[in-house]
Amino acid sequence: MRRDDREVKNLEEIYDILDRCDTIRVAMHGGEYPYVIPMTFGCELKDGSITVYFHSAGEGRKWDILTKDPRVCVEADKYYQVKRTDDGEITAVYESVIGTGEAELLTEQADKVAALKVMLAKYKESGFPVTSCHGLPKVEVFRIVLNEVTGKRNK
């Protein structure tokens, strides 16, 4: 990282930034060009790693790419404002997280339901009855355990 003074090294702090973000962007190897898609998501910090969950239909471009090459990069950010500095420059106030890993399709119903509950809790919908949802048989869920993750902030 070029700006060491902005790097966030503590995993709990990096997780806190990610958890406060509303959207992640998942970058995939989409053929001739990379493919990036904004996603709602859920995340957990457990066993010294950050895990990200997102859902998908069982078809379409994202599905086709991830089932051929599960390697992904995940990015999330919080923009706060642009401000003038004391030395007459201008800077953005922000926090961001970038991580890499492999998108693993969850095949066990219990894992899928647990991941969906994590996602729903993030968006303040923890009371939604996941197991009785009519869309449950059609939704697919991916898990990414971030094998590398960095955080950055300018406050």
Image (spheres, helix red, strand yellow):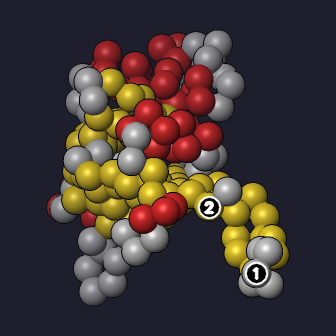
Q: Quadrant of the C terminus?
A: bottom right
- Please indicate, yes or no, whether residue 62 appears anywhere in the rendered image: no
Query: Relative to residue 132, is residue 1 drawn left or right?
Result: left
Closer-to-camera residue (89/111): 89
Crowding at mark 1 (Cα within 10 Å: few <14, some 14-19, many 20+): few
Residue 87: which disc? Answer: 1
Query: Relative to residue 155, is residue 110 drawn left or right?
Result: left
x 40%, y 19%: residue: 114
Residue 86 lies, with reference to residue 132, above or below; the image says below
Task: Determine contact: label 2, label 1, CB under 8 Å.
Answer: no
Picture quadrant of residue 81: bottom right
Secondary element at tag 1? loop
Q: Quadrant of the N terminus?
A: bottom left
* Tag nearer the camera, 2 or 1: 1
- Please indicate, yes or no, whether residue 73 appears anywhere in the rendered image: yes
x 49%, y 25%: residue: 118
Residue 90 lies, with reference to residue 148, above or below; the image says below
Percent position of residue 140, x then y: 37, 38
Closer-to-camera residue (66/94): 94
Q: CA distance from mark 2 to mark 1?
A: 16 Å
Pointer 2: what residue? 154
Secondary element at tag 2? strand
Mark 2 or 1 closer to N-term? 1
Percent position of residue 117, x then y: 50, 21
